[in-house]
Image: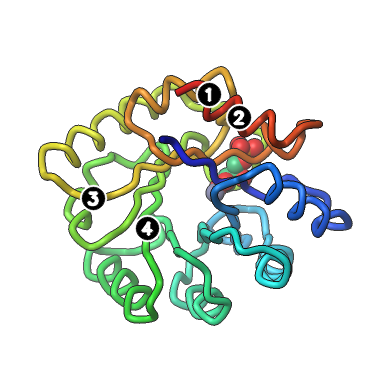
């Protein structure tokens, strides 16, 4: 069964506690925290996302997954390890070589946290293959990282299919997560391609009925 991870990026800070309560009630499977440093991507959400994660820790038991879109992965991993989140995923493009990717993967795991690799639309999916034995999830970015409310880039669907085939052929146990522009029109397509976790931000948080929006994404399976 596909799981839904709601991104809080496009939410109004003043209403965050009520939004968290309502999303928990609407049965989101995860909360998705988008950490942006203003360098890897133009947007800077460092303060907002740290505050949101503290809010979540105080008022919800729903697992928190952190998506780092930062240049200095290690610096921000430390922040979120202390907040005891469920998983930390970083962009493979932030690392200069394979050794650095492996170093960050083991640092996150040594701190008793699940780890994922995120891959931007222009990066070949083969770049993550060698790390598959060591990670729990791959986030295939279906938009350019940096902001919410964008349209899904259709060319990214074939990356989902390729990764799904590679996982099947090698019997890996790795989640395929898609992130960016997910809505009721493309949910079925990305899931049929092999995604088992869908990140949705604006489609859910801009809707009047969170539970209905989440159900629409799940029902499309
Ligand atoms: C974009 C973020 C996504 C984004 C998803 O850089 O990683 O998680 O918030 O938002 P929507 O679903 O509105 O594209
Ligand atoms: Zn994200």
Circles 3 and 4: CB atoms closer than 8 Å = no
Q: Earlier in the sequence, mark 1 or mark 4?
A: 4
Mark 1 nearby-residue class (10 Å; few <14, some 14–19, many ≥20): some
Check mark 1 vs ligand 1: CB closer than 8 Å? yes or no.
no
Asked whether the beta carbons under mark 1 and mark 3 sit within 8 Å of each other, the answer is no
- Mark 4 vs 2: CB contact within 8 A: no
- Which one is closest to the eye, mark 1 or mark 3? 1
How would you rate the neighbour count of disc 2 (Cα within 10 Å): few for under 14, some for 14-19, many for 20 or more? Answer: some
Mark closer to the observer (4, 2): 2
Q: Is residue 110 above or below residue 135?
A: below
Identify residue for label 4.
116
Give the image location of residue 209, x and y in percent.
77, 32
Where is mark 3, residue-wise? 173
The residue labelled by disc 2 is 215
> Is 38 positioned to the left or the right of 189 in the image?
right
Residue marked by disc 1: 219
Q: Which residue does the image show at 38% across and 77% down from the upper left?
A: 112
Sequence order check, earlier mark of 4 and 2: 4
Between discs 3 and 4, the one toward the N terminus: 4
For image coordinates 23% across by 50% down, the residue present is 173
Query: Which-is-in-front pick, marks 3 and 2?
Result: 2
Judge left or right: residue 74 versus residue 125: right
Q: Percent x, y for residue 108?
A: 37, 74
**Do labels 2 and 1 touch, CB within 8 Å?**
yes
Q: Secondary structure at mark 4?
A: strand
Is 110 situated above or below 143? below
User: Farthest residue toward the left?
Assistant: 169
Tell me the CA gap for discs 2 and 1. 6 Å
Which residue: 34% across, 42% down?
123
Whole-Å distance between the Cαs marked 1 and 4? 26 Å
């Amino acid at each position: 069964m596909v799981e839904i991870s709601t991104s809080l990026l496009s939410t109004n800070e003043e209403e965050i506690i009520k939004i968290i309560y309502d999303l928990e009630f609407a049965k989101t499977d995860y909360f998705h925290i988008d950490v942006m440093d203003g360098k890897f991507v133009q947007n800077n959400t460092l303060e907002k996302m740290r505050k949101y994660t503290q809010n979540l820790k105080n008022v919800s038991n729903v697992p928190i997954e952190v998506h780092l879109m930062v240049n200095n992965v290690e610096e921000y991993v430390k922040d979120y390890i202390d907040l005891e989140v469920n998983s930390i995923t970083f962009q493979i493009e932030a690392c200069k070589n394979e050794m650095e990717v492996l170093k960050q993967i083991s640092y996150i795991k040594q701190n008793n946290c699940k780890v994922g690799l995120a891959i931007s639309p222009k990066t070949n999916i083969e770049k993550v293959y060698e790390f598959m034995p060591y990670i729990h999830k791959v986030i295939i970015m279906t938009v350019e990282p940096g902001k919410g409310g964008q349209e899904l880039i259709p060319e990214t669907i074939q990356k989902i299919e390729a990764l799904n085939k590679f996982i099947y052929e090698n019997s890996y146990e790795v989640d395929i997560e898609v992130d960016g522009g997910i809505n009721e029109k493309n949910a079925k397509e990305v899931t049929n391609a092999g995604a088992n976790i869908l990140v949705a931000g604006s489609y859910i948080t801009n809707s009047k009925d969170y539970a209905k929006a989440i159900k629409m994404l799940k029902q499309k399976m």
